[in-house]
């Protein structure tokens, strides 16, 4: 079960737009991420590479936790707001729910729930 301070550190890192560094610091080596019903991506190195690849296309980014977050044992739910200004000039505003399973102080798996139509301007 993660400590509340650990979750706060994770949120602060994401809100600072250090998404790739947050994955390096707060995810297990064999962690997985899943977007809605898509196949999960597996392995921390793979997750970091995917995040860095996404960030290469971003001109500016706002990342904000919409509080409160919820914790029950090893399960944490965070509601996020993201505003992406893409290098191609388009803007995407996304709200999503992240459902995380923690293993002690690290995220073992995470599934994102969002409306994919939010990315239509990408």
Image (spheres, rainbow, N blue to C red):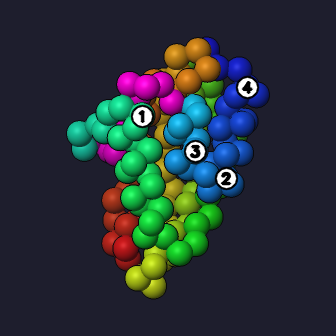
Instruction: Please tell me whether mark 3 sits on a helix, a strand or a loop.
Output: helix
- Residue where numbered disc 1 is placed: 44
Q: Earlier in the sequence, mark 4 or mark 1?
A: 4
The mark lying in front, picked from 4 and 3, is 3
The structure residue drawn at horizontal position 49% and vertical position 44%, both measured from the top left corner, is 97
The structure residue drawn at horizontal position 53% and vertical position 75%, both measured from the top left corner, is 59
Instruction: Please tell me whether mark 1 sits on a helix, a strand or a loop.
Output: helix
Q: Earlier in the sequence, mark 2 or mark 4?
A: 4
Q: CA distance from mark 1 to mark 2?
A: 20 Å
Above or below residue 103? Residue 54 is below
Q: Earlier in the sequence, mark 4 or mark 3?
A: 4
- Residues at marks 2 and 4 touching, judged by CB atoms closer than 8 Å: no
Residue segment shown in magenta: 27-37
Q: Earlier in the sequence, mark 1 or mark 2?
A: 2
Q: Nearer the viewer, residue 51 or 7?
A: 51
The mark lying in front, picked from 4 and 1, is 1
- Residue where numbered disc 4 is placed: 4
Residue 30 showing in the rendered view: yes
Q: Position of residue 116 (x, y in %)?
A: 34, 59
For mark 2, does the 10 Å Cα neighbourhood hold few (<14), some (14 to 19), or many (20 or more) residues? Answer: some
The C terminus lies in which quarter of the figure?
Answer: bottom left
Q: Position of residue 65 (x, y in %)?
A: 65, 49
Q: CA distance from mark 3 to mark 1?
A: 11 Å
Q: Which mark is residue 15?
A: 2
- Residues at marks 1 and 2 touching, judged by CB atoms closer than 8 Å: no
Above or below residue 86? Residue 14 is above
Q: Which mark is residue 21?
A: 3
**Principal secondary structure, stretch drawn in magenta:** strand
- Answer whether residue 107 is magenta in the image: no
Q: Earlier in the sequence, mark 3 or mark 2?
A: 2
- Looking at this view, name the residue that lies furthest to the left: 39
Q: Nearer the viewer, residue 105 or 99?
A: 105
């Amino acid at each position: 079960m993660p400590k509340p301070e650990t979750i706060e550190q994770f949120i602060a890192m994401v809100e600072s737009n250090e998404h790739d560094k947050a994955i390096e610091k707060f995810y297990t080596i064999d962690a997985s991420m899943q977007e809605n019903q898509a196949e999960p991506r597996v392995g921390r190195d793979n997750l970091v590479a995917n995040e860095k690849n996404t960030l290469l296309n971003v001109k500016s980014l706002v990342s904000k936790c919409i509080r409160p977050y919820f914790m029950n044992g090893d399960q944490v739910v965070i509601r996020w707001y993201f505003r992406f200004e893409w290098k191609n000039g388009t803007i995407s505003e996304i709200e999503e729910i992240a459902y995380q399973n923690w293993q002690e102080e690290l995220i073992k798996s995470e599934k994102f729930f969002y409306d994919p139509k939010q990315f239509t301007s990408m």
